[in-house]
Image (tube, rainbow, N blue to C red):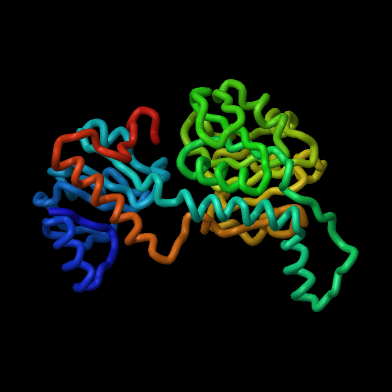
Amino acid sequence: MIAIMRELSEEMTQHYEALFSERLISVDKQLSVAYPEVTILISEPSVTPEFLAHFPNLKLIFALSAGVNNMPFDYLKANQIMLTNSRGLHAEHMSEHALAMILAQTRQINLAVKNQLRHHWAYNEGVFTTVHGKTLCVVGAGTIGHALARKAIAMGMQVTGVSRTDRQQENYQTMYPTDRLIEAVATADVVVLLLPLTPETYHLFDHQLFSAMKKGSTLINLSRGGTVDEAALIDALNHGQVGFAGLDVFKDEPLGSESVFWEMPNVLVTPHVAGDISDYLDRALDIFTGVLADFRNGTAVRNRVDLDLGY
């Protein structure tokens, strides 16, 4: 039996039961009974060991997200539960979100929205630039980064990437390993963060790294709030070291009304929606269908998460 942490209509349940060739039940986080018959869980991105204990025969979890940093890895390892995720689902629309934030700065869209609300015709306000000829550095060169690099090149940008290895990838002029991150960001006009949150990436972007960035450059963070030291970023923004930041993720969410990010003129805030799309569940379950086939066939399971690395 498969359990899913979503409330589905009867019609949707029947559709997916036929697709998966297995009974499907909906569950929420407030469980009071055990489900020994459930061996596969389609899960929200954050669950506790106490919740998972209601499924004593669980073998496989499919997370309805790419980020899995809030999963109980020690419990999964102790109980030999395989974890998979929705990696690949977000590539096109998240790369579009990154480009939208970049263009909002170069073409002064953020300023235009504010002036429209004021009914103010600001013909001579703002500094208009172009992405053409600029260098984009993708920190976390995975599937989203690949899509972003492809689109950025089409717009005339030079693209570099940072990953655990310096293996050359399509659409990147240069690939840097993570131990050359400072060198990579120092040459970039725009830096986009697409990293998983792990102990190694927590506060990776700190005072030292911001100081290494090209003065006045742009930072876009679509990864996790914890990858950035927010106090260091605010300081860099106030002193012009970072000229503009497009932020979709924050250390604490929802972002508190007292946060200075709301009022900073060189910051664009979106409320952790870069990964959202209207047909998200259908897209995720399409990926799950392939994961399920691999699992049943005993072949290498696609989108498997390394429980030691955390992604």
- For residue 235, say whether it is visible: no
Decide if residue 243 is on the left or right side of residue 305. right
What is the quadrant of residue 108 in the picture?
A: bottom right
Q: Residue furthest top?
A: 179
Q: Residue furthest bottom?
A: 119
What is the quadrant of residue 68 in the picture?
A: top left
What is the quadrant of residue 71 in the picture?
A: top left
Q: Residue at x 56, y 59 (%)?
A: 271
Q: Residue furthest left?
A: 37
Q: Residue at x 43, y 66 (%)?
A: 278
- Residue 215 lies, with reference to residue 97, above or below; the image says above
Q: Residue at x 73, y 62 (%)?
A: 109
- For residue 146, say whether it is visible: yes
Give the position of the C terminus as an image quadrant. Answer: top left
Q: Residue at x 56, y 30 (%)?
A: 162
Q: Position of residue 304 (x, y in %)?
A: 30, 37
Decide if residue 288 is on the left or right side of residue 218. left
Judging depth in this view, the residue of 170 and 119 nearest the camera is 170
Judging depth in this view, the residue of 141 and 71 nearest the camera is 141
Judging depth in this view, the residue of 273 and 20 nearest the camera is 20
Q: Position of residue 248 (x, y in %)?
A: 58, 53
Q: Position of residue 30 (x, y in %)?
A: 27, 59
Q: Position of residue 287 (x, y in %)?
A: 30, 50
